[in-house]
Each structure stands twice: as C-alpha cells, then as structure tokens.
Amino acid sequence: MTNLLLLLLLPFVFSLVLALLPKGSGRFVKIIAFIFSLVPLALLASFHDTWHSALINEPWIHALSVNFHLSVDTLSLIFLYIVAILTPFTILITRSEDYENSSYFYALIMLTQGLLIAFFTSRDLVLFTFFYEAMLFPLYFIIATWGGENRKDAAVKFLLYMFAGSILLIAGVLAVYFLYGTFDIDLIATEAGSKGIVPYLGWIAAPFILAFAVKTPLFPFHGWLRESYTQAPWGGTILLSAILSKAGIYGFLRVGKDIFPHYFEQGNFILLSLAVIGVLYGAFAAWSEKDFKALLAYSSFSHVNFILAGVFAASSVAHYGAVLQSLNHALTITSLFLVAAFLAYQLKSTLLAKGGGIAKLMPKLCWFTFFFVLSSVALPGLNNFIGEVLILFGVFSLSPILGVMLGLSIIFSVVYMLRYMKDLYFGPLKTTVQDIRDLSLHEILILIPLIVLIITLGLYPMPILTEIQKIFTQGSV
Amino acid sequence: MNTLLLAGLFIPLASFFVLMFFGSTLGRVLTGALATLAVLASFICFSSLLFQDIHPQLCNTLFNWFHVGSVQANFTICLDSLSLLMALIITGVGFLIHLYSNGYMDHDEHYSRYFACLNLFIFSMLLLVLAGDLAVLFVGWEGVGVVSYLLIGFWYEKPEAAKAAVKAFVVNRIGDLGFLIALIMTYQLFGTSNISDILAKAPLLGVGTTMVTILTLLYFVGAMGKSAQLPLQSWLPDAMAGPTPVSALIHAATMVTAGVYLIVRMHPLFLQAPTTLQVVGTIGALTALYAAIVAVKQTDLKKVLAYSTVSQLGLMFMACGAGAFYAAMFHLTTHAFIKALLFLSAGNVVHMLHGETEMSKMGGLSKVLPKTNWLFLLGVLALSGIPPFAAFFSKDLILEQEFHSGHKILFGLGLLASILTAFYLMRAYLLTFMGNLRSENEEVKEAPWIMIGPISILALGSILGGLLGYPYEGTPLLESFLQQIKLSPAEEMLDSGYVMTAETWVAVGGGLLGLFSAIYLYFQTNWLQRSSQWLKNAMYVDWFYSTVLVTPLKQFSSFIQSKVEPLFFEGSLDYSADKVLGLSGLVQKTQNSQVRSYAAWIVLGMGFIVVYLLIQGIK
C-alpha cells in the first residue's frame, strides 16, 4: 500500500518541485530531473517481489460506486517497468541549453510519467479513463512549446485526433457500468467471465477499441503520427513512440482480458487484418521517406502494428508475444531515436539527403546505430526475434496467408532500415557542416544500458517469458 | 560439457570482442596475429576432437532459450561428424585466409575492423554448423548474413560497395523468410526445433504428404538465398565488391555452402519429400548451367570466380536432389579448397595491381607473378575435374550418382556445366596470365610469403583432397567418416564402381574438351576477348527483377509518401481540424496561441481534479 502510494505520488510531487525551481539553472535542473525520473525504477526494482500484493482500494463516490482502486498484476508490472526504464532517456537526450524554461519541460515529463503509472495501476474504469485522457495534456504542451517549426499545428492536431478517438469512451464506460453495475474492473472481470457474450457487447467494445486504436496507433488511425512524431522534441518523440503507444496496447490487453474476455479469446479477424496491413503500410511509407526522424516514426508505426497483430490474434502464444514485444519495441525505438538525435544534433538536420559517408566522421555512432538497426530488424539473438516469432506463430496458426504477409515485414524492415544506414553513413562524404564530432563517453554511457537489455532479452528471455505466461492464466481467462 | 568444443566455438568470439574494443590500441601486427591465432586455436580444438569418440553426437545444452507452449528452443551445441567436417573446413580454410589477410590488408587503415569482422564471421559460421537446434542455427544463419553485409560494404565510401552490401542482405532476407516460416511450421508440426527430435519424428509425417513437401520447400527457399541459387542468385556476383580474401572465405568456401549444409543436415526430412528433392535437383542443375554460361563472358576476374561458385553450388544441390548427400559434402569439401585457392591467387593479382579486377587490364602476368601463375593454373585444372586433382573425384561422383539414380537429363546438364567450367576457367587464366604484359604499372612484383604460403597449403589440399574420397581400401575415408551419421542410405544403393565406368571417362573428356577449346580459341581467334553484353549482364536477370519487382514496389512506396499520406490521412485530419475549429470560431485563434491558453485551462482544472482524487484516495 505504502509502496504503491509512493510510486503513484512521487512523480507528481517531482513534477511540482521541478516546476517551482528557479529559472536558468539548466544543467542542474537536468541532473535533478534525471535523478527524479529514476525513482520509480528504483522503487519497482527494490520491492520487485511485493508488487503483486500492492493494493489501494478506497471508496470514493458512493452514489456511483466509484472506488479509488489501484493494484498491480503482472500485466501492469511489465508496463510499469516500460515507463520506469525509458522515461529517464527522454530527459538524457534533452539538451537543456536549447530550451528556455527547461524545468517546465522536465516537469511535464514527470507529470506524464505519473499519469502513466496511475493509468497502468487503475482498477476502476472511471480512474482508468480519467488518467488515459489526462496524458494528452502534458504531451500537448511538450509538442506545442518545444517542438519544431510547425509545433503548434502539430500539437492541435494531436489533441483533436486523440479527443475524437476517445470522445465515445465515456459512453462505453457507462454502458459497461449499466451492464455490470460497477466500475470496478476486477469485479467486472469475474462477472464478464461467467456471463458470456451478452447482446450489443460488440457495440460496447467499439468505443474502447477506437480510443486505443488512435493512441497506439492502429492502421488507419495514424493520421496524427508523422507530424506529431517529427515536430515533437526528441524527448517528446521517445515519449510518444516508446511509452505512449504502450498505453494503447495496454488498454487493449487490459480491457480485452478483463471486460471482453470472450472477444479477446476469439480474436478479431478484421482488426487483425488492419494490423497486418499497418505493418506493411508503415514499412512502405518508411521506404520513401526523406526525413529520417519520420522514417523512424513509420518504422515505429509498423512495429506497433506487429504487436497489435499479436493482440488481435486468437492465440495465447501471440498474446505472450505481444506483451514481450511491447517491452522490446520500447527499448529498440528509444535506442533508435537516441542515436538519430545524436546524429541530428551534429548534422543540424533530420534530412537523409544531408547525410552520406558519416561513418567516416562518426564511426562509433555508426556502429551503435547499426546494432540498434539489427535489433529493429529482429535479428535472432537480439530482443525482437523471439517476440516476433511468437506473434508470427500465433497469426500463422490462424491464417497462413496473414502469417506470410506479416512475415514479409522481415524483408521490408531490412529494406528501409538499411536504406537509412546507407544514405546517412555510407557512400562518399557529403555534409558541409564543420566540426562534426563522434559520440562522447557521456553519450556512449547513455546507450550502454539499452544494449545490455537488448542482448539480455535476446539471449535469456526466460525469466520474463515465465512472468508473462502468468498473465493470461491467472484471473478470469 | 565438452570444453574443447566450446573453446573452439567461443575463442573467435572472444577475439572479436577484444579487437572491437581495443583494436585501435593494439597496433597492426598484434591485431592480425591475435585474429589469426584465435582461428588457429579453434582449428586445433576441432582437430583434437577428431581423436575423441563423438559417436553418434556430442551435445551440450547451454541453457533453455525460450519456451512458450510448443514454441521452444534450448541453446544446444552439437558435434557429429558432419558438423566436425564443416568446422574443420571453416577454421582450417579460415585460418589460412586470416593469415593471407595479414599481407593483403597491410595498407588498409581499417585493419582492426576487418579482422574483428572476420573473427565474428568464423564464430557465426561455427554456430551455424554446430547448432543442435534450428532456432540456434538461425542465429548463426542470420549472423553470417550480417557479417557478410559488413564485409561486402567494408569499403563503404564506394557507392557500389554500399549498394552491393544492402542487396546481399535483402536477398538473403527473402530466403530467410522461407526459413522463418519453415521454423514456425516446424513448431506446429513437431512442437520443437531440436534437430535430432525433428529428424527422429520426420518419418511420422509420411512420405510425400503436402505438409512435408511445403516444409522442406520452405527450408530450401532459405538455402537458395544463402547459397545463391536461382532465382536468388544475383547478390553473389555483386558481393565481389568486398576485399578478395572475404570473397574467398565467405562468398566461396564457407557461408554460401550453408544452404547445402542445411539440406544435408535435414536430409531425413528431405527424403520424406520426393517432390522437393526433384525441385532441389532441377534448380541446382539449372543454376549450375546458367552460371556456367554467364561466366563465359565475364570480363571481371572476380566475377568469373563468383559465377563459378554459384555454378558449383548448383552441382552440390543437384547431388542433394538425387539423394547423393555424401557426394554433395565431398564436393563441398574439395570446392572449399580449390575455390579459396583460386580466389586468393586472384587476390595476389588484384593486390599487386592495386585493386584492378578487369581482365582487359591484365594479361602476361605469368612473367611478373610466376608463383601465382602456377597456383592459379593448378586451381583451374583442379576445378575442371582433371585427374588426379581433388574436384575430379568429387564432381565425377556427383555426375555418376545422377546417372545411376536415373536422372539422365540432370546428368546431361551437369556434364555441360562442367565442360563450361573448364572452358571459362581456362579463359580466365589465359586472359590474366598469358599474352603480353598489359599493365602499365611497372612495380608489379610477386606477393610476399605471407600470401603465397597459405595459397600453397590450399594448393596441396587441392591436389590431395580427392584422396579423402578415393576407395583404395573399401569405403573411402570421408564416406566412412560421414557414415557415422548415416549420411548416405540412398547412396549405398547406388553402385559407385568408380573411376572405371564410362561416365567417368565422359566427364574427364568433357573437362579436357573445355580446357583445350579455350586454348584453341585463345591462340587461333580472338573469340575469348570478344564481348557479349547479354552474357556479361547475366542475361539481364537483374534488370528484370528491378523492372518487374523493385521499381513497382518503390513506386508504390512513393505513392504512399506523396499522395496517400499527405492527401488522405493527414489531409483528412487537416480538413476535419479546420472544420472543428471553424465551427467553434477558433480558426484565427489557433494562430495566436489562444488554443494553448484554452488547453492550459483544461490542464489547470485537471490538476485540481488530480489533487482532489489523491486526497480522496489517501483519506
């Protein structure tokens, strides 16, 4: 109880502290923010074995039977780790000297972290929905204030699209309430498991699906993606791609498992097909992209749709794969955006055409980038391979044709990622920018933990696979 | 746990890490020495394993890799006589090529990167052949692909090298998709990817059932990619953009034989699928012939050898198709020696001419490179199937097996390919070493001992290698060695009454015909020098792929980028955003940050709600 409360509250407190710090203390603020961002990870890791008993359940609005109900199960725990591990990188990649009022920027990141932690632990649909919606605001400000040239446009579109996606969510939540007489997800899970499919259940599920589909995003709800990802500052891009997309995936898994278990077990062929199309569509979009930040954005889009294919397939193996891939995708896309940011800082551009032959000037960065590219194309022995095999196995068992289409992504991912490598790093040196320097020791140290995790998850995933397999055996399913 | 086995596998990896992290501080001599000695140590480990009893196999399970339902794999390393043979070839030839590279790369500034990659290659290839589980095999399989990419693109400043590297990786990935889907089907059918378990259960699938046919065909697609068989052959000639020792080791002697190894390793499964074996044999024969024809008019010395490799691999697959797995392995072994010999001799030429590979710029080099001249000629004779050199025994065995197993057409195609082999190799030799000295470079001189030495050892192997398969005392040495793993149940049925049969004389006659017609044409006409654009461009297969496949896909991708994304997805978003804002009368206000303050109010309100919630929660 205390631990969970600390985990929940500290990021909000930190956010407030950062916002109140005096202006103009750039480097100092960054160090403080970085230390703050590590606290949730420290909490998670030091009480690792006790989280399953963590529970807060206080009555709140009696008339509506809304409870302040938070708890942690394995599914929550994995997504909490994703937030806790990757948020610090969004701070590390930010160069305080570039930002006015950088303390506000860090405060917003901590606020997002707090809201995500709250979202991943909420067990009451009202809280769940509230925190889900609330995440948009810090991100809106991050994009609108510290983004690129079209930041305001991008931020407004981001906000509108997200609102449009989840405008019906409240109706869906109310419908679930009228069906089961409670907002408590655990109680609903027990009910839903025994009740089976009731009339109009599909209509009730639809607003949930739409809301999560927009946030992840599932094809074709990605209209906001390119502009938001490219206009956001690098830290914001990592937040969007590595962490926020996981809120959508978590939403699908949580609501699918606990509120609509029958649909979840049966899978959904239309959604599965959309996800498979999304995987290939993202790959094709990335192939001709001229801006490397956008290329990585589409690559991320392609990979999250791969995860969604695992979510929508009626196969427990694919579901395990989807959870594992959520972690793997977060690690890999963060790494890719980090090395891209290091390059962009030196090149002062995110256009592929400005690169060429950079390997000569930045050999270390080239090696690191290549390693992360290998992780991204699911090289066996690195993290993404096993997750993708599990998802492919699940999808292929349902429909060999969809399985092969999904499998095509292992060819196309190489096509666009190697084009990215070739255009930037190989060929004759083209850039006219003076004083390009290779990675500093400080920057290498940022990348090392990610490399360690990528290799460890690739070669020794059994501990986490064992955990994941508990998710869908315990509880109602 | 067998320490020798694990040491043999992991020493090159350890050396890779040392070179990767400390390569820049080690200095040239130490870097080369470390890399070379690591492979030598590995070779010694595997050689000592020859004297241990490993029958039927020696397995070490390192750890449980992943296990989810029927998708499961242990990280298992297994040694049997087949993988030991491969490991000896890899580390043996690998050691010689490392040694040679000390001379070849002496002027290159990226010395440590080169040797690090070469060591990593040895490790990945060893992992591929020692894997006791298909998933582990796949790690090595893709690993060698990555190293191949790195080494083809070694001189990354050259656009054609960077391009060839990408092409090699992508084409390999097409094959790998076949492998991956086969792996997934394997999990469905067998519930494991452990090779021994699969092979033990293979008979349960029944002979010729659809499932086993599809499964084996998919594995063969993987093999086609890695071993450059039609229609996935076009990456290998381009791969010659890498340093020549790399071409010798990776793109001739070892990596490209991985496809053959895979089929031989999985042969009990393939024997369940006669249709697949027919496909394997036919594709092998067609590739052997296609590449041999195309090699006749190549003007680049390395490309002649590259097409020759494709052609010889085709012969090995042809043998597999007829169930002659031992013959395939025998030819793989002799070919490894001979092709490394040819490539390294060519490497001397290229090195001494400062990177020149066009044969039109060569000629008359026998005068300045006398030793290389003889070594290359030896390689030509050996691969042409002239007795008593190595490939005579192995190639003859393949042709004989084809003939006796009733594949008369394939026998004919194979014979034709081997006549052409003798022809184009002799042509390459004549154009390079005979005639007038055409190079303007006056300082051309014979390669140093560190380059000549390893080639001489390979030459010895090319002369004596055939004895491994010579039945002077009952069963040949190599055959009885491989018999431990029952490599040749089908072959036992075939009579190998060797050396005496009519087909043997036909084959030898064919080789001589090829050699002498090349010599005749060289001295009597200028046909050998005459160009043929159609053949030089490999019958425009590349052009065909690019027009029919790559360009339309690329156009589709540009269409998505230039039309679908901006006009449809983002466009509709812009449109509805404008509408929504317009309805609220906020169109202008978006421009002057009014929306921001509006949103700020929401956040402020939300902040109050959070505080309220938390207070409620704590209470």
Image: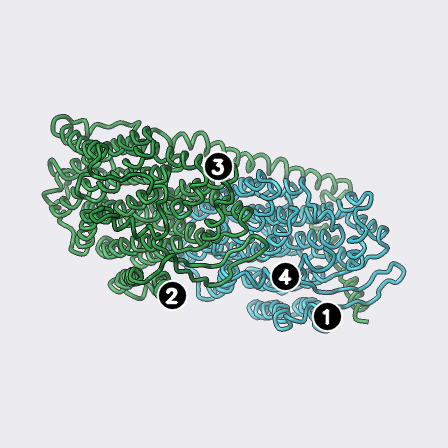
Above or below B140: residue B216: above
Q: Where does label 3 land, which residue?
A: B208
Q: Where does label 2 land, which residue?
A: B2
What is the x, y in percent for residue B237?
Answer: 32, 39
Sequence-wise, the earlier of marks 4 and 1 is 1
Q: Secondary structure at mark 1?
A: helix
Mark 2 or mark 3, whichever is nearer to me: 3
Residue at 21% of width from left, 37% of height from top? B425
Left-right relation of B529 to B612: left
What is the x, y in percent for residue A333?
Answer: 55, 54
Kindly report the distance in space between the C-alpha atoms of the residues bearing marks 2 and 3: 39 Å
Residue kind at label 3, given as amino acid type: Gly
**Depth order, front residue of B427/A333:** B427
Mark 1 or mark 3, whichever is nearer to me: 3
Q: Where does label 1 land, which residue?
A: A5
User: Badge 3, how many Cα within 10 Å: few under 14, some, many 20+?
Assistant: some
Drawn colour of chain A?
A: cyan
Q: Are marks 4 and 3 in contact (CB under 8 Å)?
A: no
